[in-house]
Amino acid sequence: MSPLAGIVTGTAVAPDGVSLAYQAGGRGEPLVLLSGQANNHHWWDGVRPGFEDAHRTITLDWRGTGASGKPDEPYTTRALAADVVAVLDDLGVERAHVYGTSMGGRVAQWLAADHPGRVGSLVLGCTSPGGRHGVERDNSVRRALARPDRDAAGRALPELMYTPRWLAAHPGPYHTTGDPGMPAHARRRHLAASNGHDAWDVLPGITAPTLVLHGTDDLLTPAGNAPLLAERIPGARMILVAGARHAYFEEFQDYATPVVLDFLAGRMHA
């Protein structure tokens, strides 16, 4: 492992031999931060410092992104959860809180279901149970992201992530709109993994205390998925962030981060 601007970096090895780059910083109880589809650990750059006084934050570059291996073979959210366990093992972390957003929230569902002893508390942000029970994005959103005009398609994603007011004040570049160094095959593999996610049947078996967070104006992963998760996972709590889009955790971090910290510390009361 090596230090980099206050962050300790290292490389774990996945069960199938793929190298997994990870980053750890801060102090306190471990908190794993899981990023969205086709993104690396920089997804959390604008948010991470808010957690590091209370937690040792752990991120990773998903396979296919950043400094991790990029095999051209099927990826699944369940297998990506095993990658997270490999990182925890390499760090010697037996149990950690887990905060997963977007595809990272899909992976976090499998992590909590398949490896309950490794998850202290679970936070699921802007995510979905997937499968036939999940609420799909509108076709107009799909068309906007699939425009043949690359510039137009490139503008569509930030508008789905952030409000116009925030975009006007923050001209970019943005850390949540994809890893620019990702090869095309890895992008396809990430899309297939996220689209193929279906954890509905295992959600009732999740035992970790769970908080579900979602922006009310999220069109990328519709907010209707939040109550599905909260009702399906025993004892889960749900908070909707008014006016927020997909990247609520960054734009509305002054609200969302303290909410998560209170939940992880057991200070949130029903």
Image: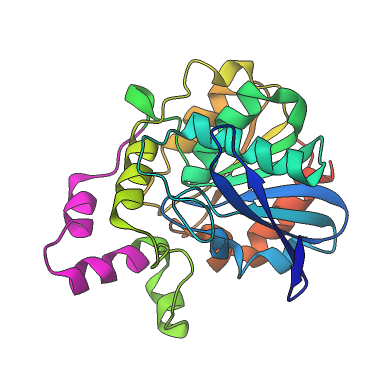
Q: Quadrant of the rendered structure where residue 134 is?
A: top left
* Magenta run includes residue 146: yes
The percent coordinates of residue 256 (x first, y second) are: 64, 57
Prevalent SS, magenta region: helix
Tell whether position 154 is magenta: yes
* Whether residue 97 is visible: no
The N terminus lies in quadrant: bottom right
Q: Left or right: where does residue 191 sit relative to residue 251?
A: left
Image location of residue 237, percent across then percent down: 65, 34
Is 157 on the left or on the right of 256, as rendered? Answer: left
Q: Which residues are magenta?
A: 135-159
Horizontal side, residue 186 vs residue 85: left or right: left
**Which of 48/260 is in front?**
48
Residue at 63%, 40% (x, y): give it. Answer: 84
* The C terminus lies in quadrant: top right
Question: Does residue 170 appear in this view?
Answer: yes
Q: Residue at x 24, y 45 (%)?
A: 138
Which residue is found at the position 46% from the left and 63% from the top? 176
* Farthest residue, direction left: 148
**In the picture shown, does residue 112 fall above or below 10?**
above
Point out the residue furthest to the front here.
Answer: 17
Q: How is the image coloured?
A: rainbow
Q: Position of residue 10 (x, y in %)?
A: 70, 57
- List x then y, in percent, for residue 15: 59, 32
Nearer the observer, 268 or 3: 3
Q: Is residue 41 left or right of residue 103?
A: right
Q: Residue at x 55, y 54 (%)?
A: 61
